[in-house]
Image (cartoon, helix red, strand yellow):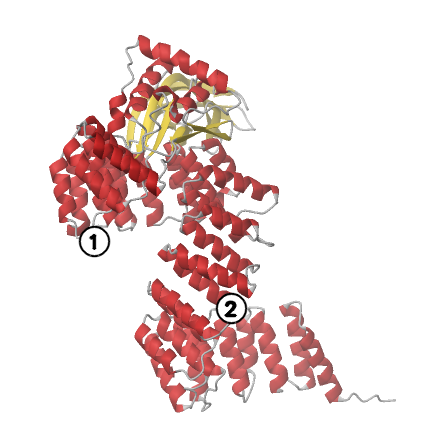
Amino acid sequence: MTISINPSSKALEIRKRLFRGCNSIKQLKHVHAQLIRLGFHQDSFLVNMILRLSLEAGNTDYARLVFDESREPNIFLWNTMIRGFVSNDCLYEAIEFYGLMRREGLFPNNFTLPFVLKACARRLDLQLGVKIHTHVVKGGFDYDVFVQTSLLCLYAKCGCLEDAQKLFDDMPEKNVVSWTAIISGYIGVAQFQEAVEMFRRLLEMDLRPDSFTLVRVLSACSQLRDIRNGEWIHRCIEEMGMGRNVFVATSLVDMYAKCGSMESARSVFDGMPEKDIVSWSVMIGGYTSNGLPKEAVDLFFQMQRENVEPDCFTMVGILSACARLGALELGDWVSSLIDKNEFLFNPVMGTALIDMYAKCGSMTRAWIIFKDMKERDIVVLNAIISGLAMNGHVKAAFGLFGQMEKMGFRPDGNTFIGLLCGCTHAGLVEDGRRYFYSISSVYSLTPRIEHYGCFVDLLSRSGFLNEASQLIKDMPVEANAVVWGALLGGCRIHRETQLAEHVLKRLIELEPWNSGNYVLLSNIYSVSGRWDDAAYLRSIMNEKGIQKTPGCSWIEVNGIVHEFRVGEQSHPLCEKIYMKLEELAKQLKEVGYVPTTEFVLFDIEEEEKEHSLGCHSEKLAIAFGLISIAPKDVIRVVKNLRICGDCHTAIKLISKITGGIKGENDPCSMEMNYMVSSDAAQATVKVTLIIGDGEDSAARVYGMITARSSNFLDESVLFQKALNEHVEVRSGQLIPLSRSVVSVPLDSFLVVQADLLGVNAKGTLRFPVYSSGTYEKRIYSQSWEIRVNVTLYDY
């Protein structure tokens, strides 16, 4: 008995199966094979479904194979292929297929054109886009809102805002996508104010913006630091009921953070019913960039408690916070949360880790990360150059700069900021001049205001106040508060009160909200006997409600960051801290220290005068460190303001009393790191010879064992031992060849090189010197092994 199968019912069954979707490309191929067996492989509807599912799975090669088997593909199949290529970022293939379709004699429709125009826009291929624009006009699609919007996106993304605006104005019907396209176009060419005005016009047309429109216009407010319009848009969002959208709410957090309103940012963040990793990253980064690193760390711990996994941007934000706090232990722990290779293969994360180690004073570890990085870019190089410069390794920074072009990198503006800061640290005026003027003369770059600020700082600190003042007058742009502040720093050092008064008046014009400028000018008036002028300035401060920025210092102990303010009374160990301060005060007096209040007249952002100089936040932090940290461990203190002259003098003397303080000052961030430590570590280096499992052996060992310290680009030999002896070794027996005790400078590498003939063993081993302990590394030959043990102590 023969049972006949109705082909149409079988086709219907396959169609239902395709509608339900396929779990894998293998399952899709199985369905395709059924089509071929049943003779439905030329059915355009079923083939189109196969193409769509294949392209949605990202398998463009299989989709193309299926398409090529179609004898007479219609416009729907061509459109599916072009759309699928664009969705999979195969832009060249999308444009190629459009050309093939035209050669086959098929004319595009209003579904084809938006996708091919999208491909041109992503490739920034304006020339081809203009040609397709002619096809739009010839096909009569110049009034189709979707095609017109795609043309608008093309011209806007290619920077042709005049053409884009004309297209937009001529559109008889504009939808939200059209408005978003023109707003995005203005943002793309940095015309942020125009973008905000276009958004205002959109609302006047009684159109309801979507989430993408709101995200874009909020990004414009962020770039403008325009909190007034940002707050207005926030109110619009609340009225439209879109505040619960995670993308919109995250953009609001970002806008408030970039405008410096962290209270508003936190209010939006806390009110979000749903937070993704981007929301957390934006909030953490906002705290860090607004000078609130402690809050960034606290929020990161909250994120950890809620089991949210950090991503690249979270890591960059929290590592930057650790850098600002000088929290090396915390930074180490944070970096351990992600596989080390993530840092070595990701230049952004690698740069953040290098920057953290450098700002915490651990230049050795920063250098190790730099040397181990598999992917480097100019930003990574700039970070290591700046790190070397700020930690006093200026010559090493210069040497690395000299090697940049050999490594295939051309210096950019940020490279020279690091070099100029290094020159300022070391007082290298002539080197600074050479680098500053080479920016334009050698590298054809335009000096930015930051370069002028660094060079003015170098000249001012070195006493060249007239040259610095003239440089400011000759600047092609108006000097900002940073540049004038650099000149003021020189006035402070060299006691130029007349010039300081002129500079401070300019600073008050530029920063009417900055309390430090008023206080400093008031003090200058007071010391000159101009009491009426001083009282007038104080009254202006009271009228405007201007308050001083409180001094704050941070110190890390056992991975926990402690915060101190001037006259701190709330710390659990407050009594012991002040007892330690009294002890230090007696010791300081014995070595001739006398508090110097004259510095108050010149130091920017002085702390409250009514408090004793001995209660400044950095002294409290150091006292806490001395009672909490082992004598040989490092104390790192970071302050939010510039340290006053008296504290600078006192801490240098405390350094001698307690075993040595090494100070590092970053003139860009105005942070001061103090590290209480010795200058060198003791190391025992032991070299042994061993034969592997197998027969006993004998050999004549001759050659050289060398140990040297390597501080980035400088090396010095610590010891050398020549060998020429006969050895007999039983399997597994250790034969000592050399044992020496050496003193290795901190922040360097201990390099042990063995070159032993006879046993054919040769190699170089590097041991970073940054923590005590015993380390072992080995050099292997065919049968023999050299084992090097290094013990570091008295760190």
The span from disc 1 to disc 2 (Cα, nearest Å) is 40 Å
User: What's the residue type where badge 1 is placed?
Assistant: Thr
Residue 276 location, x and y as percent?
A: 56, 53
Q: Is residue 270 shown above or below 744? A: below
Please name the residue that numbered disc 2 is placed on: 210
Q: Mark 1 vs mark 2: which is more N-terminal?
A: 2
Q: Return the residue nearer the eye: 774 or 723.
A: 774
Q: Is residue 480 visible?
A: yes
172 vs 520, left or right, is right
Task: Identify the residue shown where x is 51% and y is 30%.
Answer: 559
Quarter of the figure that contains the N terminus = bottom right
Closer to the observer: label 1 or label 2?
2
Mark 1 surroundings: few (<14), some (14-19) or many (≥20) residues within 10 A = few
Residue 405 location, x and y as percent?
A: 25, 48
- As drawn, the label of residue 647 is none
Q: Is residue 15 shown above or below 569? A: below
19 vs 660, left or right, is right
Mark 2 surroundings: few (<14), some (14-19) or many (≥20) residues within 10 A = some
Residue that protrudes farthest toward the top in the picture:
590
Q: In the rendered image, which quarter is residue 626 located in?
A: top left
Q: Secondary structure at mark 1?
A: loop
User: What's the residue type where badge 2 is placed?
Assistant: Asp
Please name the residue that numbered disc 1 is placed on: 446
Q: In the rendered image, which quarter is residue 30 located in?
A: bottom right
Task: Identify the residue shown where x is 81% and y is 89%.
Answer: 4
